[in-house]
Amino acid sequence: MNMQMTSQVDSASDAAQAGPVIEARDLNLVFGSGETSVHALKDINLNINKGEFVSFIGPSGCGKTTFLRCVAALETPTGGSLSVNGMTPEQARQSRAYGYVFQAAGLYPWRTIAKNIKLPLEIMGYSKAEQDQRVAEVLELVELAGFGGKFPWQLSGGMQQRASIARALAFDADLLLMDEPFGALDEIVRDHLNEQLLKLWARTNKTIGFVTHSIPEAVYLSTKIVVMSPRPGRIHEVIESTLPRERPLDIRDTPEFIEIAHRVREGLRAGHGHD
Amino acid sequence: MKTVVAVLTVVAAIVGLWYIACVPMNIKGVLDAAERAGEQVEPATARERREASALGLVAQNSFAIDRVWSVDRPRLPAPHQVVVELWQTTVMKKITSKRSLIYHAQVTLSATLLGFAIGTGLGILLAVGIVHSRVMDMSVMPWAIVSQTIPIIALAPMIIVVLYSIGVQGLLPKAIIAAYLSFFPVVVGMVKGLRSPDHMQLDLMKTYFASGNQVFWKLRLPSSMPYLFTSLKIGIAASLVGAIVGELPTGAVAGLGARLLAGSYYGQTVQIWSALFAAAILAALLVALLGLIERVLLGRMGVKA
């Protein structure tokens, strides 16, 4: 069952928004050609509206990261259309429309945390005063105030990843793309960061695209869960979350949460069945 | 403490082997001198001794063993002879004296440093070009590699002659030979260093829509620093070798190379060895100095000490 997604504006999000932030129509991406070609994305149709938190979940090879990279114009689709803020992904990249958080924090070891966060600001030509002010703001946002002068190796893995999120938040991009940002962290740290991320999302009202392997993480965070399946990479099902936007960690023990997690698991299983 | 003992043990072993090696190396010379002085040696004539093995001579003339470490022009000088020579030609001589090793070392050092500066500058420029241009990568790199397959001892006289014919002499030809040897490790290390940022870091720059210049100054150049310093250490040692080799074919009157050459003309092995040691000490000092600069700079860049 392939649920076609049309604009379903979340009551909490901005209904006045002209169009979806991300709109994919029959998107295809084939790597290589001939017998060795890989169909990484097949007929992707998806709308993401402003203020949504959308998770992409699926086994490796399902194209979830590839889709995110297409949105970021780090990969070029071979067919169909994709728009970001009404522009092509390339135009969106050039207008610095999104912040991207990678699986590894990727902080520069020769820069302090504050200087790392300044990196995009320096590149984008923000004034010195503006840089300092924004660094202070985002450090506070990810609860790293006071750590600006530390070097990355002086911080734990979880703190480093928070710093890399702060780096992606430092400039004015309404869209945050996160590629398994907490994949390398342990469960407890991960829970904590998930909770923080939700708060941050509520405060900033950003649109978030989030790639993950973890069912509880996807269900806990998302307003919309995109279940994908591999070979060729395609959307198997899109599940709208019925959970409230306000989510304490113990919401994960409610029947509603367990019900959604169950649906995601069933979707993943069915998606695998196509092989 | 344990490591100090271990290091000293190794040094002592090397010095010990050296002293032992002096015995067979110098025994013939000692016996020749003894024969001339009218002493009874076995076998009695120089011709017979030439046929005999060194170890055999040592066994037959054990009275002469203690003399092998104090020969005037030994085949292999004893360590203390070299140390005494080093002391007398550095501390005990005025720096302006033509017999001062410090004077000669300073002549070689200036050519080394100039050559090192030229070589490093050229190496970095070439590396930047190679990393940014595929054409340069394919056209320059092979020549850089080929250049290092030519023995410098064969090339040095030609460089001197060619430069002399266009009126360049003195410090510069030596520096150019030094640069010729030192640019290569810098190119190789710097290319590796500038290419060291991984895909993720380059992608990150792409998401910021950073220009090529920004990627270079903010990512590639800082990433290359550890590689650069490794190359610089190899480069400066190579530079010193180049400067010394550059002094050999010119019949230069000053410099460690000139000192080596003079020593070999007159059979002054002690002088040769002390010049060799002076060169080695100079190289060690230069490398240590670079190591210090590296520590300070990378430390300031936040690299864990």
Image: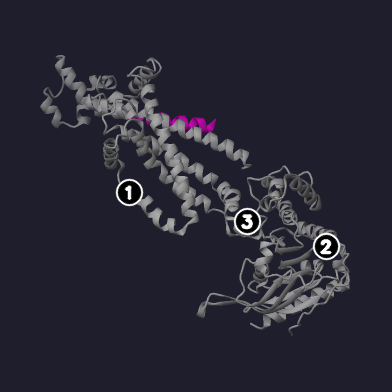
* Residue located farthest toward the bottom when viewing the structure as drawn: A1
Q: Residue at x 77, y 77 (%)?
A: A238
Image position of A194 with respect to A149: above or below: below
Under mark 2, the amino acid is: Asn
Q: Name the secondary structure under disc 2.
A: loop
The part of the image, by quadrant, that contains residue A31 is bottom right
Query: Considering depth in this image, is A262 or A58 the residue closer to the camera?
Result: A58
Q: Which residues are magenta?
A: B1-18
Residue at the spot of label 1: B149
Q: Residue at x 70, y 72 (%)?
A: A83
Mark 3 nearby-residue class (10 Å; few <14, some 14–19, many ≥20): many
Q: Name the secondary structure under disc 1.
A: loop
Asked whether the residues under the numbered discs 3 and 1 touch, taking CB atoms below 8 Å apart as contact, a structural biologist would say no
Q: Is residue B137 magenta?
A: no
Labelled disc at residue A247: none
Q: Residue at x 47, y 57 (%)?
A: B133
The part of the image, by quadrant, that contains residue A22 is bottom right
Residue at the spot of label 3: B210
Q: Are marks 3 and 1 on the same chain?
A: yes
Query: Considering depth in this image, is A43 or A158 the residue closer to the camera?
Result: A43
Under mark 3, the amino acid is: Ala
Query: From the viewer's perspective, is the residue at label 2 or at label 3 nearer?
Result: 3
Mark 1 nearby-residue class (10 Å; few <14, some 14–19, many ≥20): few
Chain identity of mark 3:
B
Q: Residue at x 66, y 62 (%)?
A: A94
Under mark 1, the amino acid is: Thr
